[in-house]
Image: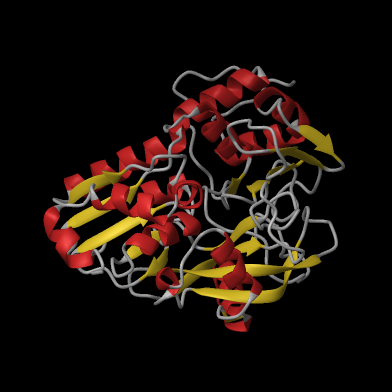
Amino acid sequence: MPKHDFSKPAAEMAQLLARHAEAVCRHYLPAGRRQGRYWLVGDVHNTPGRSLFVRLTGSGTGKGAAGRWQDAATDQYGDLLDLIRERCGLTDFRDVAEEARRFLGLERHDHAPVARGDGVSAMSVVSAAPDPEPNMAGDPDFAPVHAQRAAKRLFAMAQPLTGTLAEAYLYRRGITSAALMDAGALRFHPRCFYRVDPDAPPETWPALIAAVTDLKGAITGVQRTWLDPEGFDPVRLGKAPVATPRRALGLLLGHAVRFGMAEDVLAAGEGIETILSLRCALPTMPMAAALSAGHLAALLIPAGLRRLYIARDADLAGDGAVARLTERAEAAGIEAMTLFPQRGDFNDDLRELGLPALRANLWAQLVPEDVARFVPLG
């Protein structure tokens, strides 16, 4: 690869990486594979799968450029510098630039500044459009403001949950009708578009649509969970037989799917089913589903909150999210308490151990005043 002067803005380094996009992918994401014009892998941590795609060919800059990537499951996107940063766990851009130079075999000029140019985007939260609009679906350059509008449009098109396949799906996951009270954030769409990859023709599947809102209640995004119309499969647990049955759309970072309005106490966790499982035992406690470990760690905390219960998912990502959110809450003077499941998560507890066991485990972890306040009588 050619030697290059990187006293120029980092956009040029990103373009040079893009000219060797497949080599970058083979080096940093060897668990993936090439499929057509894309490199497919599970995520930025090199997990096997198909959720993250990297464009291997395309125009030099802008929409359709080589090196642009998106993770359909987490809604992260960026260029190859962003990918190197995430894959290597780097936080300082100078370290990212140094790692990129090392890969490219470049010599850094002494004291040469590396500036993050306008042509290189930061990580953001965006996903495929809910309908097959040209030059929009699945494109990492699909502007967040348009994604937010598309999310609002999709939620408005969806129908109330009652009597739908989405409600039946939640019941089969063990969720009770009491947990679905005050669940206006959840709706159903009978024919929600799904694409295997950005260039594939759209398919239609029924879907649970969940509204993601900010602290003022404004919709910033949605999560789509595509469902199997043929019934409840014990392996997929009712989700559609597609590669990524959950995808988000819009602005997610800091926001959540909310059940009830938090005043002084809030319970927060990752998945919708996890939070609804908690609501089976604590139907009046305000709760928020952040939709992923990364988003849980970054959840915006309401003003006036005194106590935050954090529902832990029993894995490394879940532990990291709990630790980061706890640190943020305590720095703000808020009491943070972790709720521990007995299985992998609280929906596993509900389905495998039953509601009485879930209640007993949860209630024992609450402070006494919250037991008196939120535990239902009888």
Q: Quadrant of the C terminus?
A: bottom left
Please state which of residues 168 and 289 is positioned toward the viewer in this rendering.
168
* Way the structure is coloured: secondary structure
Please state which of residues 192 and 236 is positioned toward the viewer in this rendering.
236
User: In the image, 240: left or right of 361?
Assistant: right
Q: Residue at x 65, y 72 (%)?
A: 165
Q: Quadrant of residue 83?
A: top right
Q: Quadrant of the N terminus?
A: top right
Q: Quadrant of residue 324?
A: top left
Q: Residue furthest front?
A: 378
Relative to 296, residue 110 above or below? above
Q: Residue at x 52, y 23 (%)?
A: 98
User: In the image, 175: left or right of 369?
Assistant: right
Q: Residue at x 41, y 56 (%)?
A: 355
- Residue 149 picture location, percent across and down: 57, 75
- Residue 337 picture location, percent across and down: 23, 46
Q: Residue at x 87, y 42 (%)?
A: 36
Please state which of residues 121 and 53 is positioned toward the viewer in this rendering.
53
> Is residue 102 visible to us here?
yes
- Residue 131 picture location, percent across and down: 73, 72
* Numbered-mark total: 0
User: In the image, 30: left or right of 318?
Assistant: right
> Is residue 298 visible to us here?
no
Relative to 185, residue 332 above or below? above
Please state which of residues 84 and 192 is positioned toward the viewer in this rendering.
192
Relative to 163, residue 237 above or below? above
- Residue 364 picture location, percent across and down: 23, 48
